[in-house]
Structure formats: structure tokens, C-alpha cells
Image (spheres, helix red, strand yellow):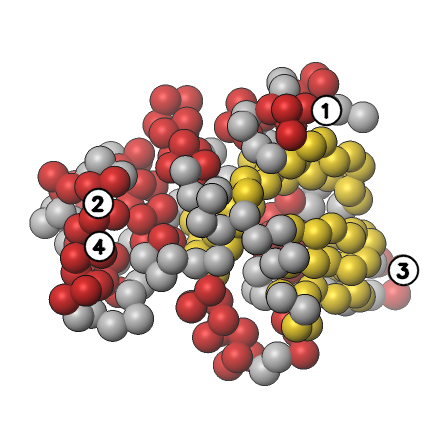
């Protein structure tokens, strides 16, 4: 077991004006695999990802990472954990525009030594953007920028990659290419992808379907790869 959520909730407001983004969700993420989180806008998908990754503290329940309560750690310890063990890919990649593609990867490395430089070059080759090594992010297409974001997330060989709507700003072809890169990581760690598009989650080992902050349904294996109509409640 890599990650475990035990009855976690996240709410905003107080008194009679409490709104739940996540309500009493429990789940287990093993050490390897590709896991989707799907649901309509406002269903709590991104909020769940933030809870699991240590970015937002639940108002109730626990998130365990290898048996350790994430939120029993100090903020400094959580920051270190996220840097060393977690990788992140967001809808809009936060790249440093005055650094080259290669330098953007070195920023994510523990140290910018020769080994890190070689590893960055290897990732760029694997993600088919080695020819852009010395280019700046402002000169890249949307698909290329997102590939760079995936490469950056993989620099530390994280135990889990959290991807929040990584294909939402891309066309189908570029979006599927990004998902295929994440799918290829499933044997080395856990990959958790939030998406509203079922086509982008085809091939998932498991899909969690959220509605109004609640976990409505879980699909396993081949069922998780089916079109949306088969997993709607």
C-alpha cells in the first residue's frame, strides 16, 4: 500500500454555510499502476488530488503514505516528501520561461550535477523532445510544454505522480500522447490522473468516479477502460 485515504473530507465555510468539496472518501492506492479520478466539474476531483498529495489538509479523516499520516508531519517534512517522492503535472505547466528546456529539468533535480544532466537528456529522448533541449518554453507548442512538464515530474523518479487535468488544454492527439507517457510510468510507480474525459483514462487500472464530493463508483481493470456511459451511476 502506497497511499490510503481514511474517511477524508474537505469543506469550505462554517456554520450553516458549509460546502463539501470532498465528503467521507476512503480509498487505497497500491505502489504501482495507473489510476483515474473522473467526474463532472465541481465534483471534487482536484480537491481529492490535493488531499492525497499533501497540498490541502482534510477537515476530517487521514491520508496515510506508507502507513505514515501525511498531516501528522510538519509542513517542512511534507514539502521535502513532495519534492523527493511525489511528482506533479498540472493543466497549465508552470515552466520557467527564462531557462531552457534542459535547465527546467535540472531545477527539479536534487542536484544539478553530471548525473542529473544525463538523466535529463535521457528523459528528453524518451519523451521525444530532445531536439528542443536548448529551446525556451515560450517557443514550444502546448503539447511540447506538457511533455516537458511530464519529464520534470519524472526527474526524481517519484513513487507517485499526481496529474490534475493534464490534457484539458490540448487537442485529442497531443492529450493522448501525454497520457501514454504517464501510462508508461505505471510499472515504476503509481500515477493518479484527474480528468473529465473518459477517452483520456482508457487503459487505467482503476477509475474512481466522483459526484458532488462523494465517491460514487469504482471500476477495475478492463471495465475502467470503457467509455463514459458504462461507468456512470
The reply to whether the C-beta atoms of the residues labelled 2 and 4 are less than 8 Å apart is: yes
Which residue is rendered at x = 20% and y = 69% of the image? 112
Quadrant containing the C terminus is top right
Q: Nearer the viewer, residue 67 or 87?
A: 67
- Residue bearing mark 4: 120
| Left or right: 127 as drawn, with respect to 179 | left
Q: Marks 3 and 2, Cα distance to the nearest angstrom?
A: 52 Å
Which residue is rendered at x = 42% and y = 68% of the image? 84
Image position of 7 with respect to 130: above or below: below
Q: Marks 1 and 3, Cα distance to the nearest angstrom?
A: 34 Å
Which residue is rendered at x = 57% and y = 33% of the image? 204
Image position of 154 with respect to 221: above or below: below
- Residue bearing mark 1: 231
Residue 57 visible here: no
Sequence-earlier tag: 1 or 3:
3
| Label 3 element class | helix
User: At which x and y percent is residue 104?
Assistant: 23, 57
Q: Which of 155 and 38 is in front in this view?
A: 155
Q: Marks 3 and 4, Cα distance to the nearest angstrom?
A: 51 Å
Quadrant containing the N terminus is bottom right
Sequence-earlier tag: 1 or 4:
4
Which residue is rendered at x = 41% and y = 38% of the image? 184
Amino acid at each position: 500500500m502506497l497511499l490510503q485515504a481514511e474517511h477524508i473530507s474537505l469543506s469550505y465555510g462554517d456554520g450553516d454555510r458549509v460546502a463539501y468539496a470532498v465528503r467521507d472518501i476512503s480509498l487505497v492506492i497500491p505502489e504501482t499502476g495507473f489510476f483515474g479520478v473522473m467526474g463532472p466539474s465541481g465534483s471534487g476531483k482536484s480537491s481529492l488530488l490535493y488531499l492525497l498529495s499533501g497540498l490541502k489538509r482534510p477537515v476530517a479523516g487521514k491520508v496515510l503514505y506508507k502507513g505514515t499520516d501525511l498531516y501528522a508531519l510538519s509542513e517542512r517534512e511534507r514539502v521535502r516528501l513532495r519534492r523527493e517522492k511525489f511528482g506533479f503535472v498540472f493543466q497549465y505547466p508552470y515552466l520557467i520561461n527564462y531557462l531552457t528546456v534542459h535547465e527546467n529539468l535540472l531545477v527539479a533535480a536534487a542536484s544539478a550535477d553530471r548525473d542529473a544532466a544525463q538523466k535529463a537528456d535521457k528523459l528528453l529522448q524518451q519523451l521525444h523532445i530532445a531536439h528542443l533541449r536548448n529551446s525556451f518554453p515560450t517557443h514550444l507548442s502546448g503539447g511540447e510544454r506538457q511533455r516537458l512538464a511530464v519529464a520534470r515530474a519524472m526527474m526524481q523518479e517519484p513513487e507517485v505522480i499526481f496529474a490534475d487535468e493534464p490534457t484539458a488544454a490540448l487537442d485529442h492527439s497531443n492529450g493522448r500522447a501525454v497520457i501514454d507517457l504517464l501510462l508508461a510510468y505505471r510499472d515504476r510507480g503509481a500515477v493518479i490522473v484527474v480528468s473529465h474525459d473518459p477517452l483520456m483514462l482508457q487503459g487505467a487500472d482503476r477509475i474512481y468516479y466522483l459526484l458532488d464530493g462523494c465517491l460514487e463508483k469504482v471500476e477495475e481493470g478492463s471495465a475502467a477502460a470503457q467509455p463514459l456511459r458504462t461507468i456512470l451511476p
